[in-house]
Image (cartoon, rainbow, N blue to C red):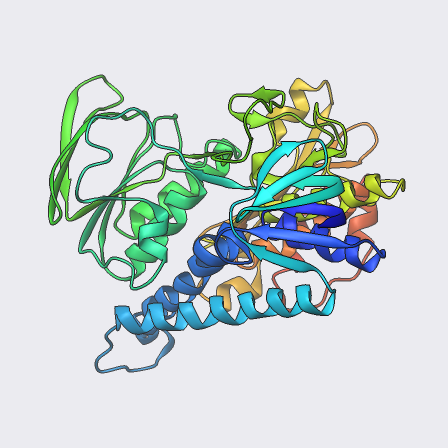
Amino acid sequence: MNYDLAIVGGGPGGYTAAEKAAKAGLQVVLFEKEDLGGTCLNRGCMPTKALLHSAETYAAIQAAGELGIEVPQVNYDFAAMHRRKDKVVESLRQGVEKLMKSSKVTVVKGTAVLQGEGVLTCNGETYEAKDIILATGSQVSYPPIPGIDGPGVYNSRDLLEGEGKDFSSLVIIGGGVVGIECASIYLSLGCQVTVLEAADHILPFMDKEIAQRLTMVLKKRGAEILPKSQVQRIEGQPGAVTVTYLDKKGQEQTVTAEGVLAAAGRKANLEGLLGEGISLELERGAIVGDEAGRTSLPHVYVIGDAKARNIQLAHVAAAQGENAVAAILGKPLPLDLSVVPSCVYTVPEVASVGCTEGEAKEAGFSVKTGKYLTGANGKCLIEGTESGYVKLVTDGASGRLLGAQLVCPRATDLVGELALAIQKGLTADQVSSVIHPHPTFCEMVYGAAEGLRSE
């Protein structure tokens, strides 16, 4: 069977590339060994956000008395929450399936194996294609901790698929996005949550000030956040699992909970991808590719989490998929990958784009920052928002916006405006010259920019 383009992996990067290529007139075959939508749609981003919405709604109803609303009794149905999550996931998956069908993309369910330039095998059949895109995503990575594969230790997939796992107490190993979002779900349901993070603060890839603010909020909600913790071993059975760790002073400590979530990272998923005698340039277990995704093997591209030195985000994979197709068609790359917003769906939400203040200073800029606090915003006060802010980082000489960090309601929506401003090279003056509606959360963007006016 011959095609113009073969794509391995049906996640955001794979199905986006398939749609763009098919619309350009290419004959496309897409291989997916599980469900279309990949990790993000089926057992990552989307189910997490669906459960977060249910859990946060439950917590909001419990706090309704502060708004003058009396709710005599409120309970949550954990199984029903997961059934709704499954409906959301199924609806989105069906949307991707319909998109592939309407785009006339041939979808093959199975594990595709790269046998050489332009050749793949799957389910005993051989497929030939002029170009190949590898979009195999990532899988859970376990640190070398004794007992981490034992009973009572779960990964994010265990908690997000099917009926999930309900706990009254949970230890989370890893304070990255997965760990912190799962912590938010369980905190909202009244679970006692302990987060063990090896770095000196949670969300180690983000600005330290964001981590400090979010740590304060999580602690206020009852979480125990323990940075600089080195997990030594895990022992016990489901219902009573003990984690032994060294605290920030090097002293051995233990914490026992009903379950443990291993959320210490992910790695490129290359299992079974390469046939006998086939090799690609790798770096730390991921495939090396250039800006367009070209690998060391001609006409083979890599995108998304399988790519080395990559940001493991669904929107990055989708953008890389579109760029790879453009390169295959001999066209300029349409998407700028130098400005990538990152989001964390906690309460309050967290978002970041561009440089932090420290990164801008290290790059040699004469930095000037502007900050607007949630306590000064009418919409935030109306909705009873936890303390937060919008912070803008600019080049003091030109006023050009270099970065933004947000800890506030709708931060994940607001960051899009700031990503556009950074990508277009706008100054704080230009951002603050635009009227923002009142009363809204987006007024905080205006307020932070207005404080940086050069006048």
Please give the name of the residue rendered at 46% of the width and 54% of the height, measured from the top-left corner: 348
Nearest to the observer: residue 181 or residue 24 = 24
Q: Quadrant of the C terminus?
A: top right
Q: Is residue 163 left or right of residue 366?
A: left
Nearest to the observer: residue 329 or residue 26 = 26
Report whether residue 408 is seen.
no
Instruction: Point out residue 277 in the picture as x, y percentages from the top left corner.
Output: 58, 22
The number of discs equals 0
Q: Quadrant of residue 333?
A: top right
Report whether residue 190 is seen.
yes
Q: Is residue 421 left or right of residue 58?
A: right
Nearest to the observer: residue 449 or residue 290 = 290
Instruction: Point out residue 448 in the picture as x, y percentages from the top left corner.
Output: 67, 47
User: Vertically, is 301 above or below 35?
Assistant: above
User: Vertically, is 107 above or below 326?
Assistant: below
Please give the name of the residue rendered at 15% of the width and 49% of the height, measured from the top-left corner: 258
Q: Quadrant of residue 77?
A: bottom left
Q: Is residue 342 left or right of residue 335?
A: left
User: Vertically, is 227 above or below 127?
Assistant: above
Instruction: Point out residue 264 in the picture as x, y percentages from the top left corner.
Output: 37, 34
Instruction: Point out residue 454 in the picture as x, y percentages from the top left corner.
Output: 82, 39
Please give the name of the residue rendered at 15% of the width and 27% of the height, measured from the top-left corner: 253
The residue furthest right is: 331
Please give the name of the residue rendered at 89% of the width and 40% of the height, measured from the top-left corner: 330
User: Vertically, is 70 above or below 319?
Assistant: below
